[in-house]
Image: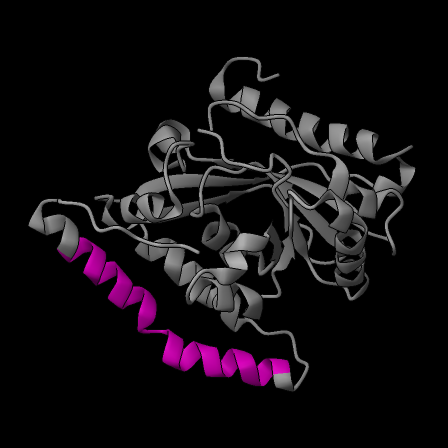
Amino acid sequence: MLSVAIPKAEPQAYLLCALRVLLIGLPLPVLLPLHLLWQLLMLPSPWAMLYLRIVSRVLGARVKVHGKRLRKDVFFVANHLSWHDIPILGGVTGTAFVAQDGVRKWPIIGWLATQNRTIFVNRAGKQQVASQINVLREAIAENWSVTLFPEGTTSDGLGLLPFKPSLFETLAPPPRPIMIQPVLLDFGDVGPDIAWLGEETGGESAWRAFTRKGSYEVGVHFLEPFDPSLMADRKEVCARARAGIAEALSERLGYVVR
């Protein structure tokens, strides 16, 4: 479960955190009932997307979109730095996400993630892989837009970790005609500052996010999509997705990302 131990800090940090919590909470009484009503009527809800856009703005993100985003029949694959990624990418696309099962138990956040159709997977439970693949296949078959962070953990944005190919099993072949679109989240020089550091707890990372002063610019680069049904197997699909992001990241950083 996510727990936040409040550290000793300057008074300004507490005030900034409180202000951001307030600004993130204020839209919920209006947008959440609208979202639930749209779900009840089985209509595509724009309210979760709007709310995530507000959250990313409150946390300081100034989002710049590059490239042409596919708007339907798409499975997004992105690099992963922190939980800033969720409101940033969700606010641009309205996508559902694949997340680790532990997030489901986080107070408030877990419930909100469920309302946004998050697909929870247990990375440690290898015996559950088949059932998780079926859940993901059902989501794709229902024409959800889904985003996967295949690194399986966070990086500092200055490189790219190996991709885990297991969940690409759902796309080799896909249950319905669908394209994969790689996405590069480019935080530039602030990447290491934004990133969820390996030694941090979720609460410590949240505290940094809510008390970080100022704003920052993040580029969301929608890269060339490809058809996974033309690939031989999940490893080829995985490699193709990673190669697209690595190439774009190399261009942005000025050195080769392997």
Q: Does the magenta stretch mainly form a helix, a strand or a loop? A: helix
Which of the 4 quarters of the picture holds residue 71?
A: bottom right
In the rendered structure, which segment of residues is drawn in magenta?
15-39
Q: Does residue 24 belong to the magenta stretch?
A: yes
Which of the 4 quarters of the picture holds residue 38?
A: bottom right
Q: Residue at x 69, y 51 (%)?
A: 70
How many numbered markers are drawn? 0
Q: Residue at x 69, y 46 (%)?
A: 125
Q: Residue at x 70, y 42 (%)?
A: 181
Q: Does residue 189 belong to the magenta stretch?
A: no
Depicted 43 relative to depicted 253: above or below: below
Q: Closest to the observer: 157 or 184?
A: 157
In the rendered image, which quarter contains the C terminus? top right
Q: Closest to the observer: 57 or 158?
A: 158
Q: Determine the residue located farthest toward the top in the rendered image.
A: 255
Visual colour scheme: one colour
Residue 108's spot in the image, x, y percent? 42, 67
Q: Residue at x 68, y 58 (%)?
A: 145
Residue 93's spot in the image, x, y percent? 58, 56
Depicted 47 relative to depicted 70: above or below: below
In the rendered image, which quarter contains the N terminus? bottom left
Looking at the image, residue 235 sits to the left or right of residue 14; the answer is right
